[in-house]
Image (spheres, rainbow, N blue to C red):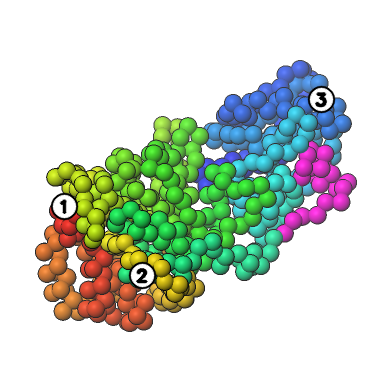
Amino acid sequence: MLSKVYSAAINGIEANLVTIETIVEKGINFVIVGLPDTAVKESHERIISAIKMSGITPPHQKVLINLSPADVKKEGAGFDLPMAVGVLVSSERITVEGIERVMMMGELALDGTLMPVRGALPAAIKARELGFEKLIVPSDNVTEAAVVNRLDVYGADNLTQVIEILTGSGAHEPVHVDTRALFAADCHNFDYDFSEVKGQDSVKRAFEVACAGGHNILMIGPPGAGKSMLAKRLPSILPPLSMSEALETTKIHSVAGKLGRGSMLMTRRPFRTPHHTVSPVALVGGGASPMPGEISLAHNGVLFLDEFPEFPRHVLEVMRQPIEDRVITVSRAKYTVDYPASFMLVASMNPCPCGYYGHPTRRCTCNPGAVSKYMNRISGPLLDRIDIQVEIEPVEFDRLASRERGESSESIRERVLRARKIQQERYKDNPGIHCNAQMNSALLHEYAWPDEAGIRKLKEQMERMSMSARAFDRILRVARTIADLDASERVELRHLSEALGYRSLDRGSYGHPF
């Protein structure tokens, strides 16, 4: 008897339908075809043992399983469950009506227990898209997949429960998640708040501008000035995730296996902090079995690179294209996958190897030329792609000892949200553009072009600091954001002047001529 059971294979962060065709006939062989990897080929023993431990006699016949389409490689143990069900249906051990409307995935242990798998959310989205009525996944994945509406998602602990769901012999109900309540309960809960920061008003203003327009930002200053402390508080003033952003972000973390058991929709923007020993593949993604890297895991959130110059130069250079295009295409001999990469880059660095170049009270102990050599670890083209470059100085003792609290994250976030609302209205007819940092040249000319006085000021500063054309565009984008925070329709000279002040490293300071 021929049976067809449906599952999904993950390609990048998207799921592709896989049809599992099973025939049980005379013979004693067990064959799996359709480009399975080693984990899929090894499923034979897990399937037979799981069926036996579920109290069902496995078929002592030839079993032929085809995973269609045959030209797409099938990876992982998530096909165990649909293949086991296919064997049971084909050998007439169970009778299932409407199995063509059910998608399933899950790894089987030898005793029939269902183990969690990666990619449950993309599979649920694909199941709804293709018109399936039910999705069966391991119980550890059910809340993750159940955020998808108009689809009955069932969680099962073992193969026996899956059979009960399919045959209707058990009292199993689909799981549904109230995403609105989930957002309301969690999207504004943060561990850190800007009210705890003493001083650093100019840096907090730079962070406000960066969040309001989605701009990349680099902090440069001595050790202990508060760079990492400020960066950790940045998510508390970012706009909350929209539903579409939350789904896309959760898909990436689901595919990467970064969601904990029982996790649901991600309601906070990701904040990724890779160590400076990270490899290019770990940062960008790829590998023998393609996986999202840190850049994609920071999608719709923040990628914080502390000790920026300590990252190997070849690792930093791989970020240049994702910063511009907001997508990563990983091409290898046997596969090509696209990973989204729309993130805010937040970086921090010392001005020199000892950390005290330009310090108001401590003397720099670096050798002549060491400062320039240290700064040269970051290429000019990469610095050009960082919209805001801000200097940070140590906080005076009187400010540190003060019990006065600073402005709260909630107050700053309100201004950020007002500016973002202006941008959403402005770009509503431009798909893929949601904030000022994503503006193209045409939109720059339409919305961010300064008046004659501003053009003269910009020309003077660009010639004096030898800025590139890319820096010109970045300055206009930041100026547009400052104008939005000011609720101004036009970019005025004062907005442009503040934006020019955020190009610290274009001034040839810190012993590095740009």
115, 326: nearer the viewer:
115
Nearer the observer, 206 or 202: 202
**The quarter of the displayed image where residue 119 is located:** top right
Instruction: Report the magenta residues as a range.
Output: 156-176
Query: What distance separates the C-alpha of mark 3 from that of mark 1?
Result: 76 Å
Element carrying mark 1: loop
* Residue at screen point 11% across, 64% down: 464
Amino acid type at circle 2 is: Asp
Other residues around mark 2 within 10 Å, as few (<14) / some (14–19) / many (≥20): few
Q: Position of residue 352 (x, y in %)?
A: 24, 49
Disc 1 marks a residue whose amino acid type is: Gly
- In the picture, which quadrant includes the C terminus? bottom left
Looking at the image, tell me whether mark 3 or mark 1 is earlier in sequence order. Answer: 3
Label 1 to label 2: alpha-carbon separation: 31 Å
Say if 146 sits above or below 196 in the image: above
Horizontal side, residue 74 vs residue 432: left or right: right
Verify CB contact (< 8 Å) between mark 1 and mark 2. no
Residue at mark 3: 59
Q: Which residue is mark 1?
A: 511
Q: Amino acid at mark 3?
A: Pro
